[in-house]
């Protein structure tokens, strides 16, 4: 299918943070989008801007149900599989449900995509797969042992995808996301990601609590870079670029202390009092890796990836969105 022709794209977990941004983007490109979501962690308000769009179709269903998966892939060209139960702490608390969704649900989607003969299956992998590997930057072919049930499930996804590519000829591409942030990311709940959680605390003049001494570092990746990677993975015609894994990141790292400093600086433009809010420190969190930094050379070489937003540039955009939408 040519790039300029209308595509039919299934986005699982399309009511979630990353999924809803992908829905919005591909609808704006003139494609047809099918969203499969059970709203376990996604939100209807993430769909409000396009719920009535003529090219948008919402299917309320669960990837743990093979029939729902088969229904959702009917007539679909590409699958962007975002549906998962995220969070390392949640997986430590409830490994069974994490496994059901992330492994059984993933396998159901692979089978459905294979049976429907979709063109390509692109899926959200995770930087947690690097586990206890201490090498930096993280290179796709060098991983360690997983440090949490969540990390195990995301590694199993990669193994299943590889088998389906080799055995059934299903084209797959895994995108190892590194600490994605941006508009629509949920600041609420026990397993909220660190950036929206800190933003909401600072906007309320509350002290953000950092796990550890704040010197753990991450390759924080703005949502628009992730959208770019999904599109490149979907559209590439390079045969060497498929049936493999890519780091999806900016290729730079910042400590949690750096992060809070930037957030205070950018939010102070809206409310100067935020600049004086202090930070609290607590114990390190189980299952967390100390440092994370991606090599993005493979994505640049094979997909032509060129991330447009550094962490700082993304934070400025994200802070503005949170201030205008959630204050």
Image (cartoon, rainbow, N blue to C red):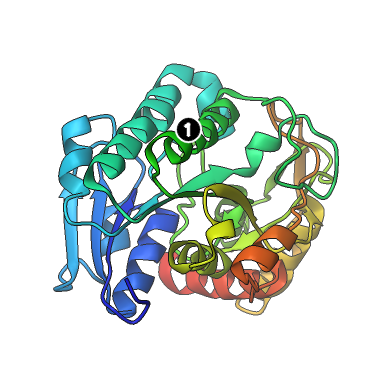
Residue in the image at 76% along x and 64% along y = 276
User: 115 above or below 232?
Assistant: above
Residue in the image at 33% along x and 65% along y = 23
Residue 40 picture location, percent across and down? 31, 38
Query: Which image quadrant for residue 125?
Result: top right
Residue 296 in sight here:
no
Q: Nearer the viewer, residue 267 or 285?
A: 285
Quadrant housing the N terminus: bottom left
Residue 108 in sight here:
yes
Residue 258 picture location, percent across and down? 80, 59
Q: How many marks?
A: 1
The residue to which callout 1 is attached is 163
Residue in the image at 65% along x and 74% along y = 306
Tell me if mark 1 has few (under 14), some (14-19) or many (20+) residues whose alpha carbon lies within 10 angstroms of its own.
some
Residue in the image at 31% along x and 51% along y = 43
Residue 95 picture location, percent across and down? 48, 19
Q: Nearer the viewer, residue 80 or 165?
A: 165
- In the picture as drawn, the residue positioned furthest to the bottom comes out as 4
Q: Indicate left or right for 81 with 280 as reference.
A: left
SS at badge 1: helix
Query: Which image quadrant for residue 251?
Result: bottom right
């Amino acid at each position: 299918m040519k790039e300029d022709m209308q595509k039919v794209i299934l986005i699982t977990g399309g009511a979630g943070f990353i999924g809803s941004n992908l829905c919005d983007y591909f609808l704006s490109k003139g494609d047809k989008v099918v969203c499969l979501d059970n709203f376990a962690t996604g939100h209807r308000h993430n769909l409000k801007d396009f719920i009535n769009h003529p090219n948008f179709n919402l299917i309320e269903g669960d990837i743990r149900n093979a029939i729902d998966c088969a229904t959702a892939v009917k007539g679909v060209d590409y699958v962007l599989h975002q549906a998962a139960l995220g969070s390392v702490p949640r997986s430590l608390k409830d490994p069974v449900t994490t496994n059901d969704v992330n492994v059984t649900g993933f396998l159901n989607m692979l089978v459905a995509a294979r049976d429907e003969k979709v063109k390509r299956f692109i899926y959200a992998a995770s930087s947690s797969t690097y586990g206890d590997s201490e090498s930096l930057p993280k290179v796709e072919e060098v991983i360690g042992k997983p440090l949490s049930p969540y990390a195990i499930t995301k590694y199993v996804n990669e193994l299943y995808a590889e088998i389906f590519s080799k055995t059934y000829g299903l084209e797959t591409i895994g995108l190892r996301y590194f600490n994605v942030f941006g508009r629509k990311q949920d600041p609420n709940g026990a397993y909220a990601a660190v950036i929206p959680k800190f933003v909401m605390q600072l906007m309320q003049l509350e002290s953000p609590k950092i796990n550890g001494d704040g010197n753990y570092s991450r390759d924080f990746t703005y949502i628009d870079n992730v959208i770019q990677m999904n599109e490149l993975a979907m559209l590439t015609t390079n045969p060497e670029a498929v049936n493999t894994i890519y780091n999806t990141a900016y290729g730079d790292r910042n400590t949690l202390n750096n992060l809070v400093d930037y957030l205070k600086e950018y939010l102070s433009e809206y409310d100067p009092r935020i600049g004086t809010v202090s930070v609290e420190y607590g114990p390190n969190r189980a299952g967390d890796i100390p440092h994370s930094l991606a090599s993005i050379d493979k994505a640049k070489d094979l997909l032509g990836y060129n991330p447009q937003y550094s962490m700082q540039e993304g934070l400025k955009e994200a802070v503005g969105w949170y201030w205008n939408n959630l204050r």
